[in-house]
Image (cartoon, grey):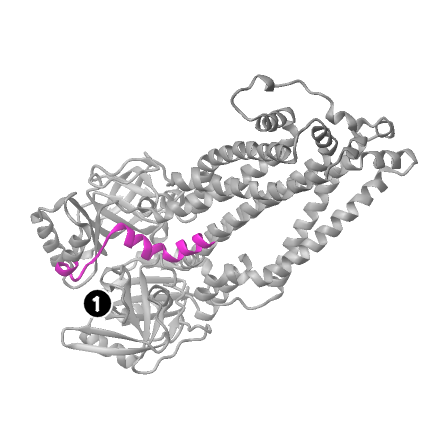
Amino acid sequence: MTMELTGSLSSLFEKSKAPDFVQMHVGEIEQEEIDSWSSSNEMVLKEQIVQMVNIDNTNIDFGSQQDNAIAIMDNYFVSQNLNFDYLLDMNSDIVDVSPGEVALPLYYKEQYNIELGETIVIHDKNFSRELTVTDFVRDVQMNPSIIHSKRFVVHEDDLKELQSHVGDVEYAIEFLLKDDANLNAFHSMYESSELPHQGPTIDYPLIKTLNAITDGIVIALIIFVSILLIIVSALCIRYTIVSTMEEDFREIGIMKAIGIPEKNIKHIYLIKYVAISVIASVVGYIVSLFLKNVFTSHISLYLGTAPTSIYTIFIPIVAILILFTFIVLYCLFVFRKFRNITAVDSLQSARTQRFKQRKKHMAISKSKVLNINILLGIKDVFSRLKMYILLFLVFVISSFIIIVPVNFLNTVESNEFIQYMGIEKSDIRIDLQHSDHMEDTYNNMISILEKDKDVSKYAAYITNKYEYIGEDGLSESIIIESGNFSAFPLEYVHGKEPAIEDDLALSYLNAKEMDKKVGDTLELIVDGEKRTMNICGIYQDVTNGGRTAKANLPSEKDDALRYELSVDVGDSTSKSAKMGEYRDTFQEATVTDINGYLHQTFGNTIDQLRLFTFIAIAIALIIAGLFTSLFLRMLIAKDSPHIAIMKTIGFSNRDIRIQYITRSLCVLAAGVISGTIIANTVGPVIIGGLLSIMGAANISFVIDPFQAYILSPFVMAAVVIIVASVNLVSIKNVEITDMKDG
């Protein structure tokens, strides 16, 4: 998956000729001024201005049953670029459309299940234009759902027609640099110029991060689970070797007694494990070739298929060789126990001491509560704790593998995840993007909300772009949201929300990159003057590349990038009905609830996580079942003289099975409890480490008690009971003759 992701990403960026720097701009531009500045800049290789027609969701009919009025995406209709930043088709070729055709973003193919040949209709008042879907677009800039903008490719003639009848024109001023090492210097130079900058800026590293982040998180989780599997396999290997050595205790001693060197004895046993490891590695690699499409389908869809190279073949093989080497070295490490076996011990049958009477830990004969077989099973666990520790660790790891992905999936799907997006939690969210009449629309919305008796509280936020002075003395841009942050407070990692005008809260990634903490200051340029802002808080945000800020600065409505309103309605008010009312009233705005916003932003990520969670659960149950089977088979072989004795004094096969099942369930209960505690304490730290690259490092799991504390243990217990019942059938084959070795 890692090779597929890196290969596909590199191929996409190469074929599309991804821009190094993009300045989005709303408003008029002077192309000659931009061309002149670019041509005189030694860093610039190529420059182009992309005209985009932004059409509201309510003016697009996808011909599906979906209510597109609730969509949060900005829809930009463009024609194919001429110099770079090419929009690609499903074959990763430069997409080409004829008049009357449209190449649709992949996001809408997934969201609305649109197929080739279907039509979309662009309409507004007396205007209507039907376009046939002839292709789907891989867009290096706007592929991921976490980016709330999508580009549709149409013919130049259609673009002109759309521009004259519907939508607003925006621009993307794009640059390809001669050397991407100069990106930071170019960024500062552009920001300090008089060129258009009424909009967010995007650069090459951010584009790459946003494209890789969804699958990257899943890959990181899979690698983490794989490490746990390697630990489990090491435990299995150790237990198998120790059990085999005990089975062959007398033979090993005899080989030493007749003069066979210990080194040669180790080699005899090592050959078997090397052979098994070779076969397993080859089979695992072959199976992975057939299963990889299950894991890489999302990568292939959005980024294209990575071209086959020596690295895509060589690196996975190297990974397998490393794993194989680890197994062999670990076997050699365990084989050190051979030195503890001597010829004298074997001839004295020291192994028979295993079944000597041990001190009782409980008075079984006096118990009036539990069945004698259950008590014997529990007693055996306490009597031989060291032997059961491996089974306990396997159950702990299996519980961890199940609970952490389940809890993480529940967290991402819950409304609580909104706090990791730097967004205030409310009943209704209203977004208003830049338009010619944005300020008038915003003021009208405020007026309506003020008079609405169904509204219990609301807060308005205005997002602007500011400049700040970096550590190197150069000015850099930062997106700051201003408003009343006490009405719908976020949970801050450190500090608190801005309370006065000089307070500034930074997102986690911004604070990390600026090397700022609560109590530090930042020089901000407001209304052309420097203002020292005090860092009052640090919050988590996985949107906008994780780089945002919040403050109580004076509103600069003329330069606003967007407006947002958070609204809570009364308990007696229907939220869905109120949302419908606002959609009719605020037709230029996007009205959603938290669930809708989360689903549209992280829908693909959630689907990937759900697939991974199901696979992780299956793997954990297989691990628990396989190791239980291995453990019981070894235990029955080891205890066969003891089992034979029990049969002679009147215990039935059923009684003995109950004892062994009790042992397994007793260890399982301890393992599940320990695994659950570790999963709920260590799990969020691990997930936070993975999500820190997105801007959320302090995750708190949203736990479903039924899934975590009832369903998961019940399923594991069912697997253990079934596996134990199957393996314990062999008890009936143990006869009194097996006592001879005991």
Looking at the picture, tell me which residue is in the foreground, 298 or 179.
Answer: 298
Is there any visible trace of residue 225 in the rendered image? Answer: yes
**In the current view of this chain or complex, which residue is farthest to the right?**
258
**In the current view of this chain or complex, which residue is farthest to the front?**
650
- Residue 292 position (above or below residue 512): below
Looking at the picture, tell me which residue is in the foreground, 312 or 182.
Answer: 312
Q: Position of residue 341 (x, y in %)?
A: 81, 31
Looking at the picture, tell me which residue is in the foreground, 509 or 93.
Answer: 93
Q: Which amino acid does label 1 sit on?
A: Glu
Residue 389 shown left or right of residue 611 in the figure: right
Classify mark 1: residues with Cα within 10 Å, few (<14), some (14-19) or many (20+).
Answer: few
User: Is residue 440 rendered magenta in the image?
Assistant: no
Residue 196 shown left or right of residue 738 in the figure: left
Q: Position of residue 653 (x, y in %)?
A: 65, 35
Residue 76: quadrant of the picture: bottom left
Q: What stretch is highlighted in magenta?
A: 583-611
- Residue drawn at 63 percent across, 53 percent down: 319
Quadrant of the frame with the C terminus:
top right
Residue 332: quadrant of the picture: top right
Is there any visible trace of residue 362 in the rendered image? Answer: no
Q: Main secondary structure of the magenta part?
A: helix
Give the secondary structure at mark 1: loop
Q: Where is residue 277 in the image (x, y as percent from the top left)?
A: 71, 51
Query: Circle 1 sits on which residue?
Result: 28
